[in-house]
Amino acid sequence: MSAIWLKDITKSFTVNEENLPVLNGLSLHINNGEFVSLVGPSGCGKSTLFNLICGLANPDRGEVTVGGKADMMAKDVVSYMPQKDLLLPWRTVLENVILAREVAGENKETVKKEATLLLSLFGLEGFHNSFPSELSGGMRQRAALMRTMLAPKPVLLLDEPFGALDAITRTRMQSWLLEVWNKFRQAVFFVTHDIDEALFLSDRVYVLTQRPARICLELKVDLPRPRRTGMLTTTNFLQQKRKVMHVLAME
């Protein structure tokens, strides 16, 4: 069953009284428990696509289905982590990660106890009373992801969560993300500009064209799980990377 299903999506905006086409007949799906990445040039409409899935915008044409049912609301199915961590500076790590559950009306102390047991999994043990300003970039992203996963929703939308990190930290975060995902197994739709990252993390990769965007490649990633960073230099990995690079170059 598809956790997300987009069919023939078209979307445009009016900018300076002119029509700006952004998405052009785009169709894709993410199955339950599947990790899927989206790669494309800057400004091609990836964030617009996330807004459509979240229900923050409506398509001009086409269908958006979340949770496998036409009447399901995005707020009941989708948890969204934007590029910036958006941690509240006046709240501690623990208070930040339980925010969604607290807003939903759950008992604060009960949720705190549940979150405390998971801090070590997210590499935050001993930092529950720290404030965001006291954390490294990688730790802030782990806290933001923990908040997203604790929501809890069956679908995670991750919009370039590691884009602002240095290369070494980013590689570590990718391996860590796969370990966490393997425990929770939510469907993940992951936006990135990094082809290596997309292939390393994903079961499938969609590649977008320039705006107005359409899908120009759907690639099933032929790598075994669990993934290891050593795979990034194998012949199989490099062959798949060349496929993506070739399509992007043609576009």
Image: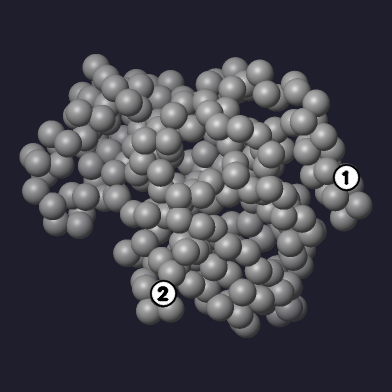
Compared to 225, does 84 lie above or below? below
Circles 2 and 1, Cβ within 8 Å, touching? The answer is no
User: x%, y% of residue 140?
Assistant: 40, 30
Which residue type does callout 1 highlight? His
Asked if residue 170 shows in the view, the reply is: no
Quarter of the picture holding the C terminus: bottom right
Q: Residue at x 53, y 29 (%)?
A: 226
User: x%, y% of residue 64?
Assistant: 52, 73
Task: Find residue 77 and report its image quarter.
Answer: bottom left
Task: Find residue 225 and report its image quarter.
Answer: top right
Q: Looking at the image, is mark 2 or mark 1 earlier in the sequence?
A: 2
Which residue type does callout 2 highlight? Lys
Q: Mark 1 points at which residue?
A: 246
Residue 16 lies left or right of residue 186; in this view the side is: right
User: x%, y% of residue 100?
Assistant: 26, 50
Residue 28 lies left or right of residue 211; in this view the side is: left
**Residue that protrudes farthest toward the bottom in the picture:** 61
Q: Name the residue under label 2.
A: 69
**Comparing labels 2 and 1, the label whose residue is closer to the camera:** 2
Q: Please tell me how many numbered marks the rendered image carries.
A: 2
